[in-house]
Amino acid sequence: MAMATLKGEMDFLADLPLYKTQKPYLILPKVEDGWAVDDPRLTNLKWISYRVPIHDMRGGDFNLDTAGFQQVDHESANLVFDTIASKEAYMLETEAMLRDLLKAEFVKCYDSVVTN
């Protein structure tokens, strides 16, 4: 039985002429630096929202090279987010998993969203 296609709002990086000459960037300041997160010196990212169809992707052959995203099965050891330390442990685990998967030198998980 096929699942129904849903519509959802997703944010995408805007296609700005600026990005032809300057890479998109986001600088995350240390809290003690006292800069506001929306300080224009810290980012040139501009987002645009679209309502897009969301299809059941189970069984699909999606990878970063062809689809721009990839589904990864990973069982976390940190699924209880009752303290800041437990959330930080989850983020560190996520960074390690992505570093291994992408063969990256550096990965920074700067935010996580937990929904029920």
Image: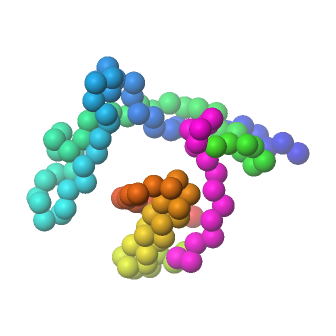
Q: Is residue 22 visible?
A: yes
Left or right, residue 25 beside residue 40:
right
Report which quarter residue 38 is drawn in. Answer: top left
The residue at the point 59 percent across, 32 percent down is: 52
Left or right, residue 36 beside residue 91:
left
Left or right, residue 51 beside residue 87:
right
Residue 96 colored in magenta in the image: no
Q: Is residue 113 visible?
A: no
**The C terminus - image quarter:** bottom right
Instruction: From the top left corner, tell me how far across and down residue 54 is, in percent.
Output: 65, 38
The residue at the point 39 percent across, 28 percent down is: 14
- Chief secondary structure of the magenta span? loop
Total numbered circles: 0
Instruction: From the top left corner, tell me how far across and down residue 111 is, in percent.
Output: 39, 59
Q: Which residues are magenta?
A: 64-78
Instruction: From the top left corner, tell me how far across and down residue 26 is, in percent.
Output: 28, 45
The residue at the point 19 percent across, 62 percent down is: 30
